[in-house]
Image (cartoon, helix red, strand yellow):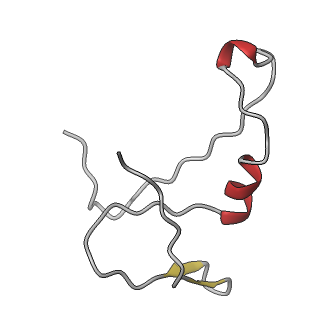
Amino acid sequence: MQRLDRMENQTHNPDNHSVTATVDHFSVYLLLNGVIWDAVWENEMRRPEEVDQDASINIRWLFSTRGSVSIN
């Protein structure tokens, strides 16, 4: 089973909008807003059929434009 682990040694530089962390192995990393992430888990989780179908949802995507990610 895979899990998400918060990296404790990360630093945020608001001047150049970057986050830096030292890693000791190659892996897949996900950059999230920790404040929003923590707040989400404070809410009650409901099944999709229990949610108001007219409610709005806010989804944000991050795409790489450097060419290191390709689609076959």
Q: Would you place residue 59 above or below residue 52 in this image?
A: below
Residue that sits furthest to the left in the current view: 72
Please name whichever residue, 7 or 29, is drawn nearer the observer in this view of the structure: 7
Identified at 52% across, 63% down, the residue is 31
Identified at 79% across, 41% down, the residue is 43
Instruction: Say whether residue 44 is left or right of residue 31.
Output: right
Please name whichever residue, 52 or 13, is drawn nearer the observer in this view of the structure: 52
Numbered label tally:
0
Instruction: Say whether residue 62 is left or right of residue 65.
Output: right
**What percent of the width, then of the height, locates residue 52?**
80, 17
Q: Would you place residue 1 above or below residue 56 in this image?
A: below
Quadrant location, the N terminus: top left
Identified at 50% across, 53% down, the residue is 62
Q: Would you place residue 16 above or below residue 41 in this image?
A: below
Identified at 72% across, 25% down, the residue is 46
**What percent of the width, then of the height, locates residue 61?**
54, 47
**What percent of the width, then of the height, locates residue 48?**
66, 19
**What percent of the width, then of the height, locates residue 65?**
39, 59
Quadrant location, the C terminus: top left
Q: Within the image, what quadrant is residue 27 found in?
A: bottom left
Instruction: Say whether residue 55 is left or right of residue 22.
Output: right
Residue that sits furthest to the front in the current view: 1
